[in-house]
Amino acid sequence: MGPEERPDSRYCVVMCGRVVTASGPEELSEHLGVDVVVDELDGPDYNVAPSHQLPLAWTSDEDGRRLLGTAKWGLTPSWVKDPAIGERMFNARAETVAEKPSFRAAFQRRRCLVAVDGFYEWGPTGRLAGARTTRGRTTRQAWYVYRADGSPLVLAGLWEHRRGLRTCSIITVPANDDLAPLHHRMPAVLEPGDWDGWLDVGDRDRSDLESLLAPADDGTLARHTVHCRVNSARNKGSGLIEPADPMGMSMAVPDQGTLW
């Protein structure tokens, strides 16, 4: 397995550390009920890693309008001296998000909807798709996970604003039965009926907010194996989400995309 095929262990063994953002601003604005688009969204990206931009929606605390913009993935609290610390804070656990100093203030006042088309997760092939080992170690198979109904996947997030830079984190919860074979955690998926409550900038009871952070119902998400090219965040292109057999061979001609 060459360097371009090895999963980046910083982002592949945690949940959630790699996503797809293919929907445009018009589609996201309509889907999320956005009033104003405040940033120019990047074009489609089929392999987004932490430290790059994610589209998100939040409520203005000035006039209550719902805004759509972007934020650097990896939350940087306003009080930290080294902004690089945010690169490690791309996920926040639902069980502790209201208590940890890094996330507590954002959980109280700066909650957001992170809109993606899907995310990648890596599971051991030995228990999913037949034994496959390298030098006695079980290798990890990449899977693409997305909403079964084909709509954008709306995740519970937090955001901060520090020295002109907006940053964000995705909240995770225990995995449901559908995803448990891949990982013990999953991103917190919010349904449309939960969005207003999550984005409310008023004083919300902690228990009310925490009740929204639950594993998605089984059947909400679908998944399939994808080519090992997704292991490197430098690889881009829509071919990355095409189904591939469990040994990493594409079932369709992959879009070569670009390297960066």
Image (cartoon, helix red, strand yellow):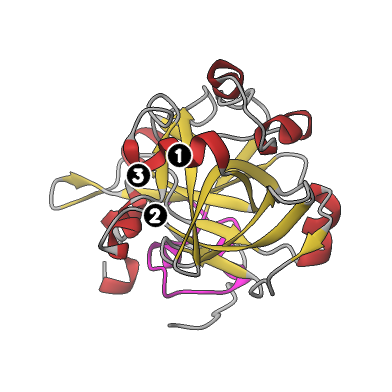
Where residue 251 sits: x, y (%)?
Answer: 58, 61
Q: Is residue 42 visible?
A: yes
* Residue contact at pointers 2 and 3, CB within 8 angstroms: no
Choose between 198 and 226: the one closer to the eye: 198
Relative to 110, residue 96 above or below = above
Question: Which residue occupies 35% across, 54% down?
Answer: 11
Where residue 203 sits: x, y (%)?
Answer: 62, 28
Residue farthest to the left, as pictured: 135
Q: Which residue is mark 3?
A: 14
Q: Which residue is mark 1?
A: 105
Q: Which mark is in front, 3 or 1?
A: 1
Q: Is residue 173 magenta?
A: no
Choose between 155 and 40: the one closer to the eye: 40
The Cα–Cα distance between marks 1 and 2, rounded to whole angstroms, is 10 Å
Q: Which residue is mark 2?
A: 78
Q: Is residue 137 left or right of residue 250?
A: left
Label 3 crowd bin: few (<14), some (14–19), many (20+), radius 10 Å: some
Task: Determine whether the residue tagged by mark 1 lies in a helix, strand or loop.
Answer: helix
- Amino acid found under the numbered disc labelled 3: Val
- Please identify the quadrant where the N terminus is shown: bottom left
* Residue contact at pointers 1 and 2, CB within 8 angstroms: yes
- Amino acid found under the numbered disc labelled 2: Ser
Where residue 177 sits: x, y (%)?
Answer: 52, 22
Q: Specify which label sits upstream in the sequence, 3 or 1.
A: 3
Q: Is residue 243 magenta?
A: yes
In the image, the segment drawn in magenta is: 226-247
Residue farthest to the front, as pictured: 62
The Cα–Cα distance between marks 3 and 1, rounded to whole angstroms, is 24 Å
Q: Which mark is in front, 2 or 3?
A: 2
